[in-house]
Amino acid sequence: MKLWGGRFEAGPSEVFERFSGSLAFDRRLIDADIEGSQAFARALERVGILTAEERARIVEAFDQMRADAASPAFFEGASDEDVHTLVIRKLKERVGAVADKIHTGRSRNEQVSLDTRMWVREEAERVRALLCGVMGALLDLAVRYSGAVIPGYTHLRRAQAVLWPHYLLAYFEMLARDWERFGEAQRRAGVLPLGAGALAGSGFPFDREAMARDLGFPALTRNSMDVSGDRDFALDFLYAATVAMIHLSRLAEDWILYSSEEFGWLELGDAVTSGSSLMPQKKNPDALELIRGKSGRVMGCLTALLVTMKGLPMTYNRDMQEDKVPLFEAADQLAGSLEMMREVIQSARLNPAKPAAAAEESWVVATDLAEALARAGTPFHEAHRIVGRFVLESVRRGKRPSDWTAEEMAGFAPEFTADFAALLNPEAGMASREIPGGTGPHTVAAALAAARERLGEMSK
Ligand code: ARG
């Protein structure tokens, strides 16, 4: 079926129909399309286009249709141009001629905006729940090894010692921002476009506030031309998805390294790793590699829609139909990655001795020494120079921090008084970082408890 045709003398070619049809992918919007159409039928009754009896028949037919649409048989043999057309055809099959009134004063341009907004709002909710799952797994893993010490890195070079929970809480923060970002995407999608018509506003005096209440939309769009040409809400979702995937990808990258033989910190569960068809010894971090790989795909989805929208003249253009495949694709890949990441985190076991040794045998304590000198009165630049020379000397002589005695240190530089030897243990330096947001043990314990509480709020 078509929702147009009077103006044409010949029908569309088979190639054009195949090329332009969107049912294959926009069928995912069927629930939203039906629900939106039910609200619209109620609005049509309020403006006197449908009688109460007609509206009741239509709404009821839609209820049935929604139940039927859950089975794939519903779509069998359908060759409609898009999901909106399909829904109207099916309505006609069910209620007959009265269905011809359902599209009064409505355009598919506002309808597709409404459906997609409804879908985004629901999907954002699902993503937020999945994000909470990952954040919860991170907190559990932090608590399991709450006292473990690791070298923190900059430039992938050992920098300063931090607590393992402090490291995991960094990812918690990233995902908490993602959770907020999806809330914002949800809020922006929650603006009702119905009433916009094709681009100029509907010619019927619909009570837009009532339609918004009916569909649970907190706000109304303010300009009909904007509605028709706007896909910002899809871009907001895609941006949020891309940033979340980048966070997952970076965690994946860390753990691919940390679980390698070279690091040996982490053991990933058998259930989330795979073997090699040739090399019997292999246990590969495929789940993490795929998460890292899929981040590229999701970023591609954002880029695809950005490029599609760039340079479109006001208002609606059929190009915009191309928003759905990347939108759905990004959502699916993100949901799958969040689910997978949660399992990987739950499966992970830390071998705390390895990162502790990495911290101890490197010069992660250098900053602690320089800062202690500064606390004792040496200007920091001078302190930095003294410790730099001390490290150079150690490297030359193959000495690790723990190989130095207090006497030898004092012999190297008189500023190194007896109490400095204690700072050769990374734990001592960490204890000096009890600043909000720092890696001091009390601060981290409090941050963990606070994160748990915040997660409780987010999961409500
Ligand atoms: N399938 C179309 C889309 O997804 C629906 C809007 C059609 N509007 C139009 N003027 N052809 O964008």
Image (tube, rainbow, N blue to C red):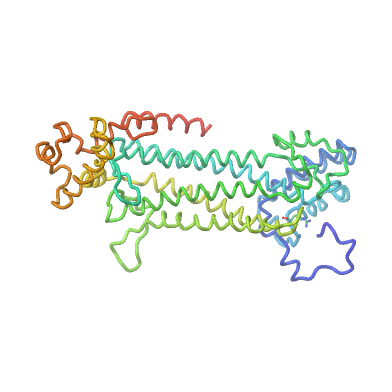
Percent coordinates x, y for residue 384 in the rendering: 26, 41
Q: Image quadrant of residue 125?
A: top right
Residue 381: image quadrant is top left
Q: Is residue 169 left or right of residue 49?
A: left
Foreground pick, 324 / 51: 324
Reply above or below: 61 against 304. Answer: above
Foreground: 158 or 266? Answer: 158
Residue pictured at 85% horizontal, 40% vertical: 44
Q: Is residue 310 left or right of residue 145?
A: right
**Relative to 411, residue 242 above or below:** below
Residue 308 placement, left or right of 203 = left
Q: Position of residue 171 (x, y in %)?
A: 42, 42
Q: Position of residue 419 (x, y in %)?
A: 16, 31
Point 73% across, 64% down: residue: 20
Image x and y of residue 59, in percent: 79, 41
What residue do we see at 30% from left, 45% from top?
159
Where is ligand 1, by quadrant?
bottom right
Kindly indicate the quadrant of the structure image that contains residue 85.
bottom right
Name which residue lies at 32% across and 52% down: 259
Q: Is residue 14 above or below residue 125?
A: below
Work out which quarter of the rendered image holds the N terminus and state it.
Answer: bottom right
